[in-house]
Image: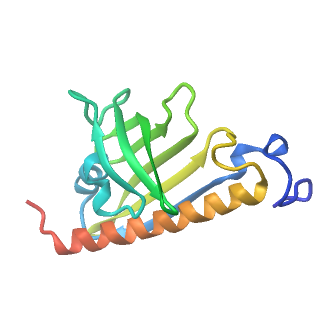
Amino acid sequence: MNAITSAHDPFEVLDASDFTFTRRAWVDAVPARVYDLVSNVSAIGRWSPDASDVTFDQGAGPRVGAWFSGRNHKDGRQWTTRSQVVRAEPGAAFAFVVGGAEDGIVRWSWACHPHGRGTVVEQSWQLLRLDPVLGTTRADLDALRDYMTDSAETTLLSLARWIAETPAR
């Protein structure tokens, strides 16, 4: 929280760029394998505590411009989101925007960096614009960012565990 805003300020006086994070984990796989796993959005339910039933639109795949849908759940509520791939660099980076590239609300991105015999994988979350559906005060948005940070950490740990337990083909 900066000196100009307080926890109870409405979102109209906030800056979306204040709500972002990046988390990292080392995984025992080469960047190409990690990229293949994270860009296969239908697999995210294996690792994410909040997403399931994620599928690319018919005929789409992990390429820029492709759309997919997914079911999310939090605090006993469920909803479906539509997302669009905005970056797809095999072996290096994958990103999508919830709501689409033109008017999206949140950007999720993955980056893969070779490190020793494995990969440091980064997962980032960035609020792109403010919307009351996400919260109406700084405290709401801080709580959302903190929740999503915990979710990303869980996802990364689950991904690392899954890679360790599942041999590459």
Task: Name the quadrant containing residue 2.
Answer: bottom right
Task: Tell me: 68 left or right of 169.
Answer: right
Task: Tell me: 32 left or right of 135.
Answer: left
Identify the residue at horizontal 51%, vertical 54% (top origin).
Answer: 124
Give coordinates of residue 78: x percent, y percent.
Answer: 45, 52
Identify the residue at horizontal 24%, vertical 64% (top origin).
Answer: 29
* Residue situated furthest right in the rendering: 4
Which of these two is toward me, 124 or 73?
Answer: 73
Give coordinates of residue 17: x percent, y percent.
Answer: 70, 46
* Residue situated furthest left in the rendering: 169
Which of these two is toward me, 66 or 22?
Answer: 66
Give coordinates of residue 51: x percent, y percent.
Answer: 38, 55
Give coordinates of residue 115: x percent, y percent.
Answer: 35, 66
Q: Is residue 7 above or below residue 125?
A: below
* Residue situated furthest front in the rendering: 76
Identify the residue at horizontal 50%, vertical 29% (top origin).
Answer: 101
Identify the residue at horizontal 26%, vertical 53% (top origin).
Answer: 43
